[in-house]
Image (spheres, rainbow, N blue to C red):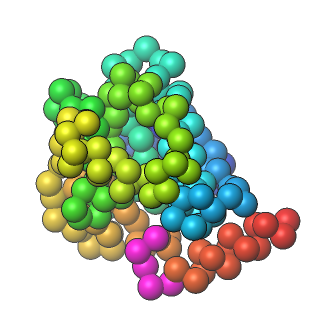
Amino acid sequence: MLTYVIAAEDEFEETALNLLDIHDAQRVNPVFTDDTCVSGTRGETGCFRAHKNVWEMCAAQADDRCLVLERDWTIGDQDPAHVASELQSLPTGDDYYLVGNCGHGLCTHAYVIAKKHAAELSGVDECAHNMPVDAFMNKMCRDGSAACGVYEKETMPGCFGYGLIQQNRTDMIGMHDENNEMRERRDNMLLLL
């Protein structure tokens, strides 16, 4: 299963991927935009577009499904060999399988997407839907337009969310943290560059 990681070049952690026996991961650039058509924010709009870029790449490759990770993914204190084994034995019948989530089927920091589903989604107009990518995917699961699954696991120390792969909250600020203004300041600084 080909793996895509949405991360800036300096945030791409190849060593951690190798521990999971993932040696062919492809880094996908985050999308920075002035558009605010998704939830009225540049961040949500760029996030949706970065995932669309991954879906296009996934649809064009040979494997039947792809693992998608965002830059803040972590396996926490789990044994890498166990996680690698679990990733290889994930169910294969779902269009969209959350390997990690933030509860209620939200967050897109770790999921497997079927190639055929990625092809269908690559042409979606994010501005017409005006909802974050995780809410969009969750809606498709709830309304039955996608077959979905979720890996169940409690939150690990230093992490956020649930599942086999969670969000790193030891080294990174996330969407759900109290320090969201730090992200906004970073986004504003990038616009000045």
Q: Main secondary structure of the magenta part?
A: loop
Q: Is residue 151 left or right of residue 165?
A: left
Tell me, yes or no, if residue 169 can be seen here.
Answer: yes
- Can you give x and y, in whole percent of width and height, for residue 55 in the image? 48, 33
Position of residue 32 relative to residue 89, above or below, is below
For residue 13, above or below residue 4: below
Q: Position of residue 192 (x, y in %)?
A: 84, 70
Left or right: 125 in relation to 78:
right
> In the depicted view, which residue is nearer to us: 146 or 153?
146
Task: Report the magenta residues as a range.
Answer: 175-179
Residue at (27, 32) in percent of width and height: 95
Identify the image quadrant of residue 106.
bottom left
User: Which image quarter is the N terminus in?
Assistant: top left
Give the residue at x 50% y 32%.
122
Examine the structure image and report whether residue 46 is included in the region drawn in magenta: no
Where is 68 relative to 31, above or below?
A: above
Q: How many numbered dots are placed on residues in this image?
A: 0
**93 displayed left or right of 129:** left
Q: Toward the viewer: 124 or 96?
A: 124
Q: Residue at x 59, y 41 (%)?
A: 28
**Residue 89 occupies quadrant:** top left
Q: Residue pushed farthest right? A: 193
For the C terminus, the image quarter is bottom right
Q: Is residue 1 visible?
A: no
- Occupied quadrant, residue 66: top left
Q: Indicate the position of residue 117 as horizontal and vertical percent values.
A: 35, 28
Q: Which one is in front, 48 or 163?
A: 48
Image location of residue 94, percent across then percent down: 21, 32
Residue at the top extreme? 62
